[in-house]
Image (cartoon, rainbow, N blue to C red):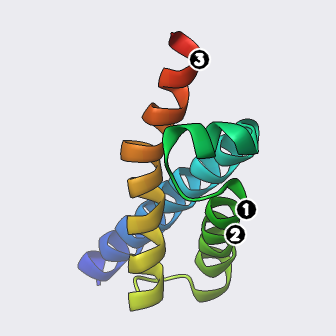
């Protein structure tokens, strides 16, 4: 019985960590101008905001680690690892 409780707590922690990552990526995507995305050679701001917005909504509605949530998490991580540094690099120059 205790193992199931621990598993439930771990699932809850993973859910909230992934939710925070997706919300952070979405809010970060909203902060840069549309021209910045074009200058960095990335997908448009509208596209990234749509992808990340759907990722946040999917996390709320679908919950667990379904294939859709996995794809949404990967999209958020790609944004944070590739797109966000490219956009931030434009402002450091």
CA gap between label 1 and label 3 equals 20 Å
Disc marking residue 4:
none
Residue contact at pointers 1 and 2, CB within 8 angstroms: yes
Above or below, 45 against 24 in this view is below
CA gap between label 1 and label 2 equals 6 Å
Above or below, 47 against 28 in this view is below
Q: Earlier in the sequence, mark 2 or mark 3?
A: 2
Q: Which residue is mark 2?
A: 50
Q: Position of residue 76 (x, y in %)?
A: 48, 59
Q: Earlier in the sequence, mark 1 or mark 3?
A: 1
Pointer 3 local density, CA inside 10 Å: few below 14, some 14–19, many at least 20:
few
Q: Position of residue 38 (x, y in %)?
A: 61, 46
Q: Which residue is mark 1?
A: 46
Q: Secondary structure at mark 2?
A: helix
Q: Position of residue 87 (x, y in %)?
A: 54, 33
Q: Residue at the spot x=55%, y=82% of the render?
A: 63
Above or below, 79 against 12 in this view is above
Q: Residue at the spot x=35%, y=66% of the render?
A: 10
């Amino acid at each position: 019985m205790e193992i199931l409780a621990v598993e439930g707590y771990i699932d809850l922690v993973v859910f909230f960590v992934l939710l925070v990552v997706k919300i952070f990526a979405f809010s970060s995507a909203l902060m840069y101008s549309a021209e910045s995305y074009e200058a960095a050679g990335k997908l448009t701001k509208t596209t990234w905001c749509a992808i990340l917005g759907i990722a946040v909504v999917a996390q709320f509605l679908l919950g667990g680690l379904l294939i859709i949530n996995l794809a949404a998490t990967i999209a958020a991580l790609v944004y944070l690892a590739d797109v966000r540094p490219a956009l931030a690099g434009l402002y450091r120059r």
